[in-house]
Amino acid sequence: MHFYSDNTAPAAPEVLAAIQSANQGMARAYGADEWSERLDSAFSSYFGRPVRAFAVATGTAANSLALATFTPPYGEILTSADAHVIHDECGAVELQTAGARLTRLDTSNGLLDAGVLEDWLADHPASVHSTQPSAVSITQSSECGTVYTPSQVAAIAAVCRERSLALHMDGARFANAVASLGCAPGDVTWKVGVDVLSFGATKNGALGAEAVVFFDPQRAADFELRRKRAAHLFSKMRFLSAQLLCCLEGGFFLANAARANQLAARIAAAAGSRMLYPVQANAVFLRFGPGQKDELRARGFGFYDWGPPRMQAARFVVSWNQPQGDVDALCEALAGWN
Amino acid sequence: MHFYSDNTAPAAPEVLAAIQSANQGMARAYGADEWSERLDSAFSSYFGRPVRAFAVATGTAANSLALATFTPPYGEILTSADAHVIHDECGAVELQTAGARLTRLDTSNGLLDAGVLEDWLADHPASVHSTQPSAVSITQSSECGTVYTPSQVAAIAAVCRERSLALHMDGARFANAVASLGCAPGDVTWKVGVDVLSFGATKNGALGAEAVVFFDPQRAADFELRRKRAAHLFSKMRFLSAQLLCCLEGGFFLANAARANQLAARIAAAAGSRMLYPVQANAVFLRFGPGQKDELRARGFGFYDWGPPRMQAARFVVSWNQPQGDVDALCEALAGWN
Amino acid sequence: MHFYSDNTAPAAPEVLAAIQSANQGMARAYGADEWSERLDSAFSSYFGRPVRAFAVATGTAANSLALATFTPPYGEILTSADAHVIHDECGAVELQTAGARLTRLDTSNGLLDAGVLEDWLADHPASVHSTQPSAVSITQSSECGTVYTPSQVAAIAAVCRERSLALHMDGARFANAVASLGCAPGDVTWKVGVDVLSFGATKNGALGAEAVVFFDPQRAADFELRRKRAAHLFSKMRFLSAQLLCCLEGGFFLANAARANQLAARIAAAAGSRMLYPVQANAVFLRFGPGQKDELRARGFGFYDWGPPRMQAARFVVSWNQPQGDVDALCEALAGWN
Amino acid sequence: MHFYSDNTAPAAPEVLAAIQSANQGMARAYGADEWSERLDSAFSSYFGRPVRAFAVATGTAANSLALATFTPPYGEILTSADAHVIHDECGAVELQTAGARLTRLDTSNGLLDAGVLEDWLADHPASVHSTQPSAVSITQSSECGTVYTPSQVAAIAAVCRERSLALHMDGARFANAVASLGCAPGDVTWKVGVDVLSFGATKNGALGAEAVVFFDPQRAADFELRRKRAAHLFSKMRFLSAQLLCCLEGGFFLANAARANQLAARIAAAAGSRMLYPVQANAVFLRFGPGQKDELRARGFGFYDWGPPRMQAARFVVSWNQPQGDVDALCEALAGWN
């Protein structure tokens, strides 16, 4: 019973079918194929405004290249203390930006607060001696399984605008956030001031496909060159694009996310006071008593520890295809300890 | 009729089947799955010695990360004037090495000569003021459709060893070279002094999968960290690994390459004195008279120009699935002009 | 009355005389001159063991190049939250390391504690997904005007050794620390586990000269190439070296530092409860009431604010040549408010 | 008798006097001093138009930072095959540009020809796969001791303008070029299309000071941040600025250069047919017969070999303070072999 991460899941059957169907005959390489050429318009429909979208294969590629477009080498990116870009990308942002700095701000339940951002900026006036604040990166849904409301994003964006900072959203689990909010994709992105989104598909059913979406096409600037240089311009790009098109255009994608969220909510209900953070998407964070994590593992549950060892906490992520029985079993185990 | 490149071809049916078959249930992410864990041994069998192999998704990733493992930021990589790493990777090697230099040496028919390398090194003694020669990169089969013999590689490797330079082989079309030479994969790599190989699968039938193969496992060093940082550690790594395993273990892979080589040889025969370089793999380079390239294009042949415009030359690459009819038509068109 | 920083001071007369005396006739460039060739032995005498020393012109060059020698691009450098390398070098460390990360640890009075370091390491186990802890950087005397005792440094070094981290000391004000401790230079460096020191001379009387000192000559590794590439190998290197030799060999250097420390101690005594941190070297940090900083400025005192604006704090640094009258005046002003 | 390089010379007495005179009392650090604040206007007078000028301490810093201002990481800089930025800066340009590429174009007598540049650009159309031509760098006087006429520079600049390339001039020996041409400094720079100049002072009498001069102040852009990050913003900046002011404003500077040029011309006359290139500034390149270089060295002449060993050539550079007797002796030795 894998609760390690939603990336332990296989690809959705709809995605494999899309790849199969794209695998017919010759097609121009490097994005000059019919699938890739439809990407901008498919994302524009999805978001309800003209955007530019670029396919890449990993979330780390999406994040690091998106941020590099807005951040000079002497720039500074303000992000949450829990951010994936800080903890799980082995310096990818630093590589693609040629050495810009990631600075951690305190969060509440994994969510960055506009006031905290504003205070930090007031307390750190830039000079020729300092790195230069250039962008803010937030994660939706967050690394703690919580979800920013549109108004929370708007408040952050207002601070960004005033300071000429770009606002990046790491949407590795964007579908889970949209399903949780019950809003349109645009409601929590460009309408509230997001400049660029890492749109995640892999965790929610793709084989390996993400997109970088620029809400102002003018600002895509030199992204194409950066993607190529980072070795993320695929020769057989049609296979990435076909995955993304099918996720955008098939109802299964939102349904997958909604299902995972609902199963996570059931775990939350069973966990009661063990919860570290509100469960608003498909991840649940729990604290345990001595020996309890070992016991769960002995009973066949796979999951990662969370936080410093002495916290005795753990993370459970529900995948799009998580067998309902896994969740039933976990709920039962947790309920037995209450 | 696409002769642009072998990357306009679709994936081979065997590869799609392998992906389908890997798409069952949960699997640990980031390479802790059963397919990825079999990669080293599959490549070791393929090459006839213990190696370490790392899957990546693009040839540019393979080349740039392989070279970065052996080249410090102040290093210099000596390569052929036609090299893909120079002309077609938008500075990827410079990115991954943090600024090492690629230096072009003259070639004969796209092949670097050991004597040219030796002379260059003698003429450019290193000092604290210069970049430091660190690696040599050769392409097999070459960007000009020619193939290094084992003894040509051995001669280059001897110069490398004497100067403590690493020897990298860009094998984007390694299968075509092996099919052309009729040798074992080890015969033209580690047995003749190659340190690290970019093993190409995409052009010869994969969806998108390449491998970096270290012939001395000790020297893989920090490759894993570099791959992650470059955003080329895939979460659903099983799909890359499954592609590679199927290429290594299925007879179709060598057969695909051999077929493409044979069709290219037929074009060569029809082209006669138009040929710029000997045709030893699956690419043919031809020079034309005024208007002839336009005429070919008007007749439905798709291909890229080669060299400076005034050369009036063109490149034709035969794909693994190239319809025989395409080749017949091209041969006929060429023969009509002789 | 400049209390902005000790770098507002001129060069000491001894230093100008040394430059004058080195300015005789031709001398081989790039360090092959008689002054530069004496550098290693002069620093070896100064520290009481064989070392390798490299002249550079700025403290930022010393810090960033020293750290780059020990830190790979995917590395992480643990340092104090107040560190100069974080706040005042505009990303120089990131540039020279090709993107390694600086991580801030909490300090007490500007001093990093071995226990805090140990806890952080325990709480952040490294994996392929994370940056890799590679070095620790501490500042002596610290950015808060405090001084590490040899045993405090030894405790940090013990944690470093266990985790194979290099220990770097930013000694921009090393002479002030040595004068404060009354110890030999070796007592607070190599004898207690420091691997590499940025030895500062500029603030204490040089025109512009610092040195990077490797206590294990083997580990100087590729420093010479990194210095050249960073454009810090001077053609007329004799002038940097002559400054350093004169600082190492002239008694004035320690005397300058001791004098500045004593004047700072007088300010501390006058400031009483305004002090933010113990005054152990030549810098004094004070908090003020509303309007008091303005009033001091109106009376001709020049100094920088410290910390976030709402703290109403300020930093006063005493220079080697600070007129005693400046200090008298400041003491009097402060005493008037007590 | 040192003919190694003009950087074996000491500083001119005028320069030391200027430093001495700047060494009075406190002065704001990092360029907020009275000398530094006068730099822009002094350079503007020197060049006859409003410019922005930034002091750095080495020519490599000037070149690499100037080029980094105009070249993105995926950019390409076209330069002469003999260029200092290629051969003698250990990858500094690659460091500061975060990996841009230096491409060597053939030269005639060390001078890049506009036609060669134009042909190269025509033969190398840029695409998303290639690095992007961004700047051209020429050296004045050149690494071969020759000098571009204003009209030669203008022809190169015309090609640059058409292709939106920046034009950089490495003026490590700019004074020698100006003395040779007998023109005003502006005549061979901004009036003929140069965008940015590395203005050299060190070789012609400074202790260690160069300037980066932007002829369009708007384009200085983020230079200040790049200089700081490269560790070339000096705390005691007054000493760099004082050197530059004294070179710009003192007649000795041009006189020094003219004297060195004239002595070089005398060597050229004595060398006759040994000359490799026309002698137009202060460097002379000669070819020798077997054993002759050894013999010269045995007679006390110090100089560097030039080119590959089998060329048996050598470079002689005349310094601003070269004793006339050194030149007499060399002329005599050469004449004896004719």
Image: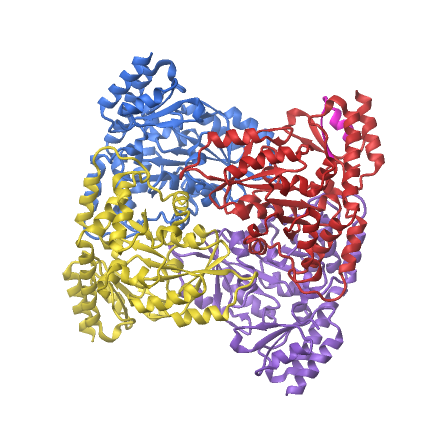
Chain colours: A red, B purple, C blue, D yellow
Q: Point out the image quarter for the C terminus of chain A.
A: top right
Residue C218 covered by magenta stretch? no
The region drawn magenta spans A282-297
Q: Position of residue B269 (x, y in %)?
A: 66, 82
Q: Which residue extends farthest top?
A: C338
Q: Point out the image quarter for the N terminus of chain A.
A: top right
Q: Position of residue A90 (x, y in %)?
A: 58, 42
Q: Residue at x 49, y 46 (%)?
A: A72
Query: Does any portion of residue C181 appear in the rendered image?
Result: no
Q: Compared to B267, does B150 lie above or below?
A: above
**Quadrant in the rendering for residue B2:** bottom right
Q: Compared to D332, does D259 lie above or below?
A: above
Q: Position of residue C149 (x, y in %)?
A: 40, 23
Query: Does any portion of residue C270 appear in the rendered image?
Result: yes
Residue D137 vs residue B111, the one in the foreground: D137
Residue C233 vs residue A157, the one in the foreground: A157
Q: Position of residue B137 (x, y in %)?
A: 54, 62
Q: Residue at x 22, y 62 (%)?
A: D179
Residue B126 vs residue C328, the one in the foreground: C328
**Quadrant in the rendering for residue D46:** bottom left
Residue A295 covered by magenta stretch? yes
